[in-house]
Amino acid sequence: MSSVLKKIKIFSGNSNIPLATEMCKILGIPLGNSVVNRFSDEEIWVEIGENVRGMDVFIVQSTSTPANDYLMELLVILDALKRASAGTITAVIPYYGYSRQDRKVSPRVPISAKLVADLLTTAGANRVLTIELHAGQIQGFFNIPVDNLYSNPVIYGYMKERFNDDLVIVSPDTGGVERARAFAKRLNANLAIIDKRRPKANVSEVMNVIGEVEKKTAIIFDDMIDTAGTVVQAAKAIKEKGAQEVYACCTHPVFSGRAIERLNNSVIKEVIVTNTISLNEEKKQCKKIKVLSVAGLLSEAVKRIYYNESVSALFK
């Protein structure tokens, strides 16, 4: 164990053990000893297998599929650590589930992102470390510090090596324009926007492509890909507008429903994602998927939090 990080403990739920293990390897500390199991009726049972009294504890858990199970795991682990007298508890949530329900878009619907924020705080989290919130204002739902990192440094390095000039970054909707514009600026690339309508959840219709994509390499850039319906339709529209090649890039590979089938049958040449969500074996078999690791980014943030140093440099 690193002597300078001797008061750090990192634990993991079941959602993304490989990422937590990689973080521990980078930091030079062992993964914390804990058991997260189920009673016969599927209630979650947790036991922390080592002393955490007075320690700075980080628990790594994405609330990805099955979202409800992994969220409940996280809450129970937080409670266990709080009752074990941990000094500070940071919930490291690479993918923050329920983030799409961040406002009332119609009458009599919940703001689930706020509900989850309240649950995490009540369970015992003193701080939240996450990556690429679907909406930045979710930070305001918490009454504890929230560090919202961006995967751009990880993705940018790969893009610079992988692609030459004549790129166009495409936002799949108007809501992602700011994110796509910032990335396009770093790559010195042009920007295009997909004009789409969403009649209901997980259903979208591409209406038009705004911007010049003809004879260019187009990269559809978003924070997440869920059912892949939007990105596949967008890729088809971009290709029909004369783009040479179409790629897709996102931070969170949710890949639910028929997402892998859609991607395999699409005109998209490669899908660049990060490991904020651990892919199962079926998804790993998709040859179009390129996974980049955010373990280094998260590990650096953990060190800065531990030493009370600025984390803001990692937001860029």
Image: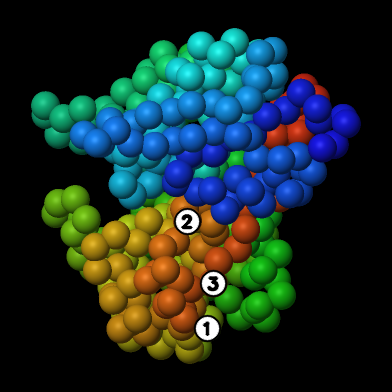
Residue at x 45%, y 18% (from the top left corner)? 79
Q: Amino acid at mark 3?
A: Lys
Q: Give whichever of 231, 127 is nearer the camera.
A: 127
Q: Is residue 78 shown to the viewer in this render?
A: yes
Sequence-earlier tag: 2 or 1: 1
Q: Amino acid at mark 1?
A: Lys
Give how far apart the Cα atoms at labels 1 and 3 are: 21 Å
Quadrant of the rendering where the N terminus is positioned: top right
Which residue reaches farthest left? 108
Residue tagged by mark 3?
A: 290
Residue at x 81%, y 30% (from the top left corner)? 5
Provide the secondary structure element on which disc 2 rests.
loop
Q: Is residue 7 left or right of residue 254?
A: right
Sequence-earlier tag: 2 or 3: 2
Q: Position of residue 254 (x, y in %)?
A: 37, 56
Q: Is residue 315 left or right of residue 248?
A: right
Residue at x 20%, y 65% (from the top left corner)? 205
Residue tagged by mark 2?
A: 278
Q: Position of residue 198 (x, y in %)?
A: 20, 55
Q: Position of residue 70 (x, y in %)?
A: 37, 39
Q: Amino acid at mark 2?
A: Ser
Sequence-earlier tag: 1 or 3: 1
Are the residues tagged 2 and 3 within 8 Å (C-beta)? Answer: no
Residue tagged by mark 1?
A: 216
Q: Give whichever of 53, 39 is nearer the camera.
A: 39
Provide the secondary structure element on which disc 3 rests.
strand
Q: Give whichever of 218, 41 is nearer the camera.
A: 41
Give how far apart the Cα atoms at labels 2 and 1 are: 32 Å
Q: Nearer the viewer, mark 2 or mark 1?
A: 2
